[in-house]
Amino acid sequence: QKEVEQDPGPLSVPEGAIVSLNCTYSNSAFQYFMWYRQYSRKGPELLMYTYSSGNKEDGRFTAQVDKSSKYISLFIRDSQPSDSATYLCAMSPQGAQKLVFGQGTRLTINP
Amino acid sequence: EAGVVQSPRYKIIEKKQPVAFWCNPISGHNTLYWYLQNLGQGPELLIRYENEEAVDDSQLPKDRFSAERLKGVDSTLKIQPAELGDSAVYLCASSLVRGNTGELFFGEGSRLTVL
């Protein structure tokens, strides 16, 4: 069993929809939780970062961490075609040094 | 400010041939990472450098893979000999050590095809 599980999709939704992306994990030592976005043939880029539990909001994006359930989520409101990409969850007990990535969910927003 | 630069972007070789990838990290970033990304998968760490020291190479297949970071700046990842299963994207990333929030800055990757 992988330390981090993420549904690979693909996920296809109409423009303007609310998107929910999720990951589960097994390592209770994880304290740092991130979401990276990766466009086709590009490197991943950090989208959201959360330390420990709780919610964090940045514009149309909201990240949630539930450590008791070992479950993290990313919500995208008012989704745009430019949001079409692969979304990778990543987590670590020590910042960037020990990042473990999920498989990535491929998301398409249809105009 | 320039981002992480990798070359070549694409490389096609026959099995058993050697191949090398080069990475120039963001200026001032002490930590450099090489990741392997297979198709449809997330990146997996191969090796992490703090300055010129390899501090985590536990996932690097040392029988055929080698890496170096001379002078603590640029880095090279080498595969010799390449196998069919090495076809993947090799990502280089860098980060600051202090105040590290977990943000890695990735290059665009070097896509290897082994025939």
Image (spheres, grey):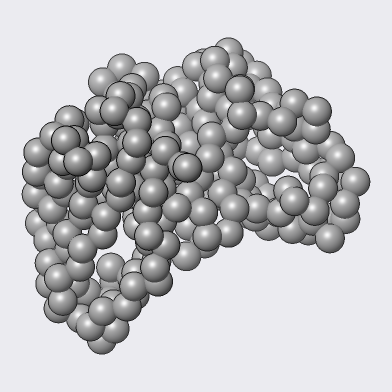
Query: Is the residue A81 above or below the residue A85 in the image?
Result: below
Residue furthest toward the bottom? A111
Q: What residue do we see at 27% from left, 55% from top?
A: A22
State the image coordinates of residue A67 (x, y, percent, origin top left).
18, 35
Q: How many marks?
A: 0
Quadrant housing the N terminus of chain B: top left
State the image coordinates of residue B2 (x, y, percent, origin top left).
43, 42
Inspect this view and state whether residue B11 appears: no
Inspect this view and state whether residue A96 appears: yes
Quarter assignment of residue A8: bottom left
State the image coordinates of residue A52 (x, y, percent, origin top left).
17, 30
Q: Nearer the viewer, residue A89 or B89?
A: A89
Quarter assignment of residue A20: bottom left
Say left or right for B30 vs A57. Answer: right
Quadrant housing the C terminus of chain B: bottom right
Q: What residue do we see at 25% from left, 86% from top?
A: A111
State the image coordinates of residue B104 (x, y, percent, origin top left).
39, 36
Say left or right for B104 vs A31. Answer: right
Query: Is the residue B14 above or below the residue A50 in the image?
Result: below
Q: Nearer the viewer, residue B98 or A68?
A: A68
Q: Nearer the viewer, residue A104 or B68?
A: A104
Q: What residue do we see at 47% from left, 42% from top?
A: A1
Q: Nearer the viewer, residue B43 or B29?
A: B43
Q: What residue do we see at 28% from left, 41% from top?
A: A34
